[in-house]
Amino acid sequence: MTDLRQTMGAEQQLKSIFKQAQGYAFDYADGAAERSVFPQPEALANLALFDEDMPNTNGDASSILQQLHQYGSPASVAQTGGRYFGFVNGGVIPVTLATKWLTDFWDQNTALQVMSPITSKLEEICEGWLQQLLGLPNTTVAGFVSGTSSAIFCGLAAARLRIYANQGWDFNARGHNGAPSIRIIAGRHTHGAVVKAIALLGFGLDNIEWVEGDDQGRIDPTFMPTLDDSCIVILQAGNVNSGAFDPFGEICDNANKAGAWVHIDGAFGLWAGGTQRLKYLTQGMDKAHSWSVDGHKTLNTPYDSGILLCRDKEALITALQASGDYLTSSYGEKRDGMMYTPEMSRRARAVELWAALKYLGRSGVDELVFGLHQRAVQFADELRAAGFDILNDVVFNQVIVSPSPEDEITQQILEYIQASGECWVGSSVWQGKKVIRISVCSWVTSEQDISRSALTFVQARDAICAK
Ligand SMILES: *Cc1c(COP(=O)(O)O)cnc(C)c1O
């Protein structure tokens, strides 16, 4: 081991591999706007070069980086270039990336305050700022998790604990066997991550009471069942296809009267609540009990950054209870991050979130989020002017495009666009029809990027329809 330790010691001291990585990183960043958005076939074929047996002996750090940049970088998706509109994948604000680099050198574990006073402090600051920015109740606590999927899981675990406790049932001690029943109420258009959490938590997918929505995918409150204190209601801030927001106020009022719990999944849409110009979309969301949101989508922090916000601290930390004699918890005085998350060891992701919030300020959040909306509107306008059907009201950053009433033609147009390398968009099914789905989610995307991408849609349609 001595030889290897000496080698690593020298690498650490000389820093040349870090400079090498930095050079590659800058190279990558400079090329991101003009390269093919999706990797070219040659780059994908070269991935076979990674197929090798596990090495028997230790390798060379510099050649590892070299291999990664030469064959790995071209096989990445140029998500940071400004013309990536697939799924709902955010860009990355420069200062948050620089923050990540710095804190990578810290290599902190944020489980306990005693492991990392600075990250504990910044988690606390983020918690307070998010409460203020989003206008949430002053009892709201935050758990910093890997993404919204995990955040939904935590929110529903807290809900389960509280709703059972209200029925006189100690869930942690007694579990599901013989427990009183809980009703799960969710919109027909709820995200797959919510469905996953419901299954993981043992509620049973067949037990979900689905609520029908309108033509935008919003829950129609007139279809809400009568609520009682055994209900967990899951609402949505930002439909993953249309970007639509459920009507929160009325449903939350009824839930609160009945003693039900409301979780709002706002993976990308919750940030509307932190803006001046789009805040109206989230009206009444402060009356819910828990909320899930991503830093890595709309807010453009690096992956993986999800946040669970919960007004019922006791329910959350009891649901995620952790114990062990060696855990010298300072709970009650200083913040131990693991009390609010399923994980124990975690990287210091809240530091990047802190940097994003500190850098943007309230006006910057408004400018960033409203800018995504404006460019989504521009995209929809240009496509409509070119004769494409836009199927949703573009209230946020999502656009649903129907290039053809025939699914087969839509598929061909989609594939043409994806292969062009000019931009990348995904597909979905909307009201029974295959559609192209656009998500404007990166601060980098300019008006020119939108026009260039809209032109690609036109070229794709012309090419396919000429056949
Ligand atoms: C992306 C998304 C999720 C899942 O979030 P991850 O961060 O990918 O785990 C859940 N709900 C909605 C509405 C989403 O857009």
Image: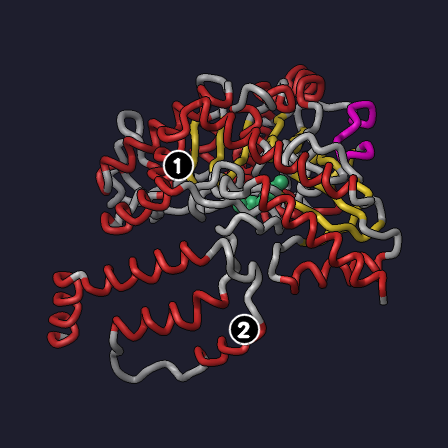
Q: Nearer the viewer, residue 362 or 129?
A: 362
Q: Which quadrant of the figure shows ligand 1?
A: top right
Q: Which residues are magenta?
A: 214-225
Q: Nearer the viewer, residue 98 or 351?
A: 98
Work out whether mark 1 precedes mark 2 in sequence or the reverse, and give the earlier one. 2
Q: Residue at x 54, y 30 (%)?
A: 271
The answer to whether residue 153 is seen in the rendering is no
Is the shortest distance between ligand 1 and the CB of mark 2 under 8 Å? no
**Residue tagged by mark 1?**
353
**Residue tagged by mark 2?**
44
Q: Position of residue 220 (x, y in %)?
A: 79, 27
User: Measured along the vertical axis of the image, is residue 270 above or below residue 131?
Assistant: below
Q: Position of residue 239 (x, y in %)?
A: 68, 37
Q: Residue at x 30, y 84 (%)?
A: 56
Q: Nearer the viewer, residue 37 or 278?
A: 37
Residue 152 included in the magenta stretch of the image: no
Split into 4 quadrants, where in the image is the N terminus? bottom left
The image quadrant that residue 23 belongs to is bottom left
How far apart are the alpha carbons under marks 1 and 2? 33 Å
Residue 224 included in the magenta stretch of the image: yes
User: Measured along the vertical axis of the image, is residue 36 above or below residue 92?
Assistant: below
Residue reaching furthest to the right: 405
* Horizontal side of residue 73 vs 441, given as left or right: left
Residue type marked 1: Leu
Split into 4 quadrants, where in the image is the C terminus? bottom right
Main SS of the magenta segment? loop
* Horizontal side of residue 77 vs 210, given as left or right: left
Q: Position of residue 6 (x, y in %)?
A: 11, 71
Q: Nearer the viewer, residue 84 or 284?
A: 84
